[in-house]
Image (cartoon, rainbow, N blue to C red):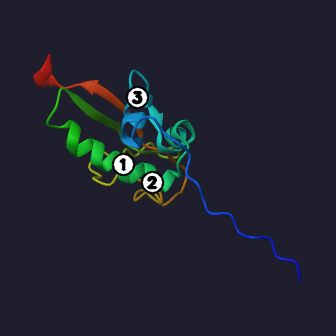
């Protein structure tokens, strides 16, 4: 049997850290986690971990992560009290799964103005 030798995985060379790339992508734009993952070329699952860290680290600086909460497209319920960044599975009011993703952006914090 002819087996090909497995080549080791070589990650893509980056000139900035992933979090800085995400922050640059969010400057002046509002994006979903899916759009961020496409822009930075990482999985959507990884994006949520980085966004959580960005949320904590930017709260002490001149910029702040702004989160437009997820919203049910059927009944209009807004998940405003939700702490998790991921999209919820279903609406607690109408039980539908047709939910718009939360959107993220970076803005100058009120204390820096």
The answer to the question of whether label 1 and label 2 lie on touching residues, with beta carbons closer than 8 A, is: yes
Q: Quadrant of the N terminus?
A: bottom right
Q: Give the residue drawn at x 37%, y 31%.
A: 105
Q: Which mark is residue 46?
A: 2
Along the horizontal axis of the image, is 73 left or right of 63? right
Q: Quadrant of the C terminus?
A: top left
Gap in angstroms between the C-alphas marked 3 and 2: 17 Å
**Residue that label 1 marks:** 50
Vertical placement of residue 100 versus 25, above or below: below
Q: Position of residue 90 (x, y in %)?
A: 47, 59
Vertical placement of residue 26 versus 98, above or below: above
Q: Residues within 10 Å of mark 1 (few under 14, many from 20)?
A: some
Disc on the earlier residue, 1 or 3: 3
Gap in angstroms between the C-alphas marked 1 and 3: 13 Å
Q: In this rendered view, identify the residue nearer to me: 79 or 17.
A: 17
Q: Give the residue drawn at x 26%, y 43%.
A: 55
Disc on the earlier residue, 3 or 2: 3
Circle 3 SS class:
helix
Circle 2 SS class:
helix
Q: Which mark is residue 24?
A: 3
Q: Position of residue 9 (x, y in %)?
A: 60, 60
Which quarter of the picture shows residue 97? bottom right
Q: Residues within 10 Å of mark 3 (few under 14, many from 20)?
A: few
Which quarter of the picture shows residue 17? top left
Outermost residue to the left = 111
Q: Which mark is residue 26?
A: none
């Amino acid at each position: 049997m002819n087996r090909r030798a497995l080549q080791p995985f070589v990650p893509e060379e980056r000139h900035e850290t992933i979090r800085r790339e995400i922050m640059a992508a969010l400057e002046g734009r509002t994006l979903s986690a899916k759009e961020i993952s496409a822009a930075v070329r990482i999985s959507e699952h990884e994006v949520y971990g980085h966004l959580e860290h960005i949320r904590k680290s930017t709260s002490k600086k001149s910029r702040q992560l702004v989160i437009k909460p997820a919203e049910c497209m059927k009944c209009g319920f807004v998940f405003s009290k939700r702490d998790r960044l991921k999209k919820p599975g279903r609406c607690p009011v109408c039980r539908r799964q047709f939910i718009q993703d939360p959107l993220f952006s970076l803005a100058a914090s009120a204390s820096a103005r």
